Amino acid sequence: MTALDTDTERGATAGGPAAPEADRGATWLAPLAVALGVFTFVTSEILPVGLLTPIADGLAVSEGRAGLMVTVPGLAAAISAPILTVATARADRRKVLMILSLLVVGANIVSAVSSAFGAILAARLLVGIATGGFWSIAGGIAPRIAPQGKTSKAIALVYGGSGAAAVAGVPLVTILGDAFGWRAAFWAVAGLAGLAFLGLLAFVPKLPSTGSVRFRALPDLIRTNKGVRFGGLLTALFVGSHFIAYTYVRPVLQDEGITAAQVGMLLLVYGVAGLTGNGLAAVIIDKSLKGTLYLIAGSLAGAMVGMALIPVNLGTAAATMVLWGLAFGLLSPAVQTWYLRAAPEAAEVSTAINTFFFNLSIAVASFAGGLLVDDLVVTSVLWAGAALAGAGALTAWIGSARTGLGGSARRSDALAEV
């Protein structure tokens, strides 16, 4: 077991002395409020994906350049996740999340009213900073606001907000933006962030600091824990595979003759499939984490290659989006499970590391995809995504062999006790 310089939430994550808890007689309203916040923040971060073409047209920029609206917050979130986790470790956790919620309200209002691409990118930078901090802190407080005996379910609910944003939030704001204009989507997310603020205020109790996390804890965990290092590779490859292509799925589909209205419907199909995958994740992962990662890789690659090779019509596009959605619905729970198995004694630190790699991968992949879209053909992002998925499968195979983390839940628990 790795010795880390961390005390934060130790009672909830490391089996040490009990941390000060929220009222354990509380209902599910507190975890639901935090999950709504995670859903809102992640939806805000990747909102431009479904509306990339109309946003690019409205701001008179190329689709590749418009992709910076995903790159910038992704990079900011990657950097802010560990920094804000450490910098705010001694502050009341509820208060920090409420301040970040107000920041997202303001940033989305700026995006909704501005006609200058530079101003919108600056607002998107603020969204990324807030998202990284909110996501990493929310995971650490989930055990403290869970109803008595329901810690695992509360953690799953809070993290489920992230997956739901990718598979449901983006399709819904895309449909809204197609119906009322892309600026309406930013207004809607600003409203959701306001609701998240009110939910935190009304239902989440004060959560005073329980200690501190020092910056060196993050690189120390990466340096000393082989499983965490493989987790970083898995996150980078699978998230990169998804976002290098998904960021530009609208221009890909429209280039093949799919209408704007049909794109929104297809993203909704993708969202339903993703929620299904998210719901099945616990059962599949418990049986074999390695097998789940193989399934994710094969489904991502199959969907992307299929979209690139098979003549695209509404039926074939729907089939590939179902496969793609199922894969991404499994992705977040699978990689988070890998981290928690690799470092069960340092859940908050490993979550911050996962958040860093996840958001950095969004930034790098969306930027690389933009270069491919502008300089080559739009379908080149599909082939790049499929290649990254294949590399992810290879990493899962090697990592499982070297760490033993890829087996069933029962086998992993046995290894953790050794």
Image (spheres, rainbow, N blue to C red):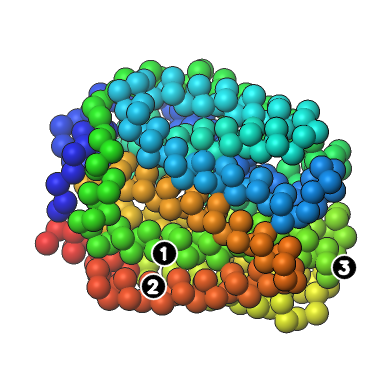
Can you name the residue that lies furthest to the left here?
A: 418
Distance of mark 1 from mark 2, alpha carbons? Answer: 7 Å
Q: 150 and 309: which one is in front?
A: 309
Q: Quadrant of residue 385?
A: bottom right
How far across and down, in percent of the image, does residue 283 sit? Answer: 42, 62
Residues marked 3 and 1 touching at CB (< 8 Å): no
- Judged from the image, the secondary structure of the residue bearing numbered disc 3 is loop
Q: Is residue 234 above or below residue 209?
A: below
Could you classify mark 3 by the number of other residues whose Cα lies within 10 Å: few (under 14), some (14-19), or many (20 or more)?
few
Q: Quadrant of residue 104?
A: top right
Which residue does the numbered mark 3 point to in the structure image? 257
Which residue does the numbered mark 1 point to in the structure image? 234
How far across and down, in percent of the image, does residue 147 sit? Answer: 37, 32
Residue type highlighted by circle 2: Thr
Q: 275 and 184: which one is in front?
A: 184
At x 25%, y 29%, the residue is 212
Is residue 32 visible in the rendered structure shown here?
A: no
Q: Earlier in the sequence, mark 3 or mark 1?
A: 1
At x 51%, y 26%, the residue is 100
- 137 displayed left or right of 240: left
